[in-house]
Amino acid sequence: MSEVVIKAESRNDFGKGAARKIRRENKVPVVLYGHGTAPQHLTLPGHELLLALRTPNVLIRLEGAVTELALPKGVQRDPLKGFLEHVDLLLVKRGEKVTVDIPVTVVGEVADGILDQQLVSVSVEAEATHIPEGVEVSVEGLEVGTHITAGDLKLPKGATLAADPEAMVLIVSAAPTAEVEEGAAATEGEVAEAATENEAADAEAAE
């Protein structure tokens, strides 16, 4: 995987007020930790960091105040506006193994039934500088009753499964029959009718 180079600056002011000031300057407060070292408080340019984080498990090469490789491990965003509020970065070294979640992408069409994807990501162990972007699973032609577990996935070269191999990734279930759909509609109608009758009774009692 490619590396994204971002310039880092040291950060000596802490607290909510200092963080707001940093964000007003279009920067993001960051903490770099790992390998038993003391956490390092940094600021990174907000736009560059936001673009980098669009790639899952992006490898960031920090330059400037520090020269290190890091992976994003905690991202805090404003719940309304979506801008970055704070990011935790994990210090990594070339050649070491790390455990990360990679997205599971479904390709193809099932033969019949309904596809129920229960896992959208799976935990794997991979070399820090060669983390796969994701794993694809083909459902082409699968029939009702077929299921695929994490252990069935064909992981990219160099990656090993870190999740429970029995964890269910997807299931092909039977589509609802016309009788079932009609029964559900009838039940909804009965519930609505009962609610209307109750409202009418309440209105009469109030009078």
Image: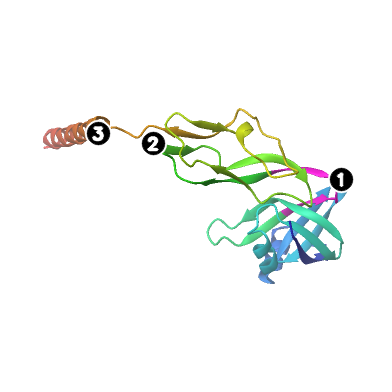
**Marks 3 and 1: CB-CB under 8 Å?**
no
Vertical side of 31 occupied by 65: above or below: below
- At label 2, the amino acid type is Gly
Badge number at residue 35: 1
Mark 2 Cα shell of 10 Å, populated few (<14), some (14-19), many (≥20): some
Question: Is residue 11 visible to the viewer in this orientation of the structure?
Answer: no
Q: Residue 118 appears at what percent x and percent y? A: 52, 37
Kind of element beneath mark 3: helix
Q: Residue 58 appears at what percent x and percent y? A: 71, 56
By secondary structure, the bulk of the magenta-drawn segment is best described as strand
* Label 3 – label 1 distance at C-alpha: 59 Å
Residue segment shown in magenta: 88-100
- At label 1, the amino acid type is His
Which of disc 1 and disc 2 is earlier in sequence? 1
Nearer the camera: disc 3 or disc 2: 2
Would residue 185 appear left or right of 170 to someone viewing this image? left
Kind of element beneath mark 1: loop
* Label 2 – label 1 distance at C-alpha: 49 Å
Would residue 135 appear left or right of 31 to someone viewing this image? left
Badge number at residue 111: none
Badge number at residue 113: 2
Which of disc 1 and disc 3 is earlier in sequence? 1
On-image quarter of the C terminus? top left
- The quarter holding residue 29 reads bottom right
Vertical side of 21 occupied by 143: above or below: above
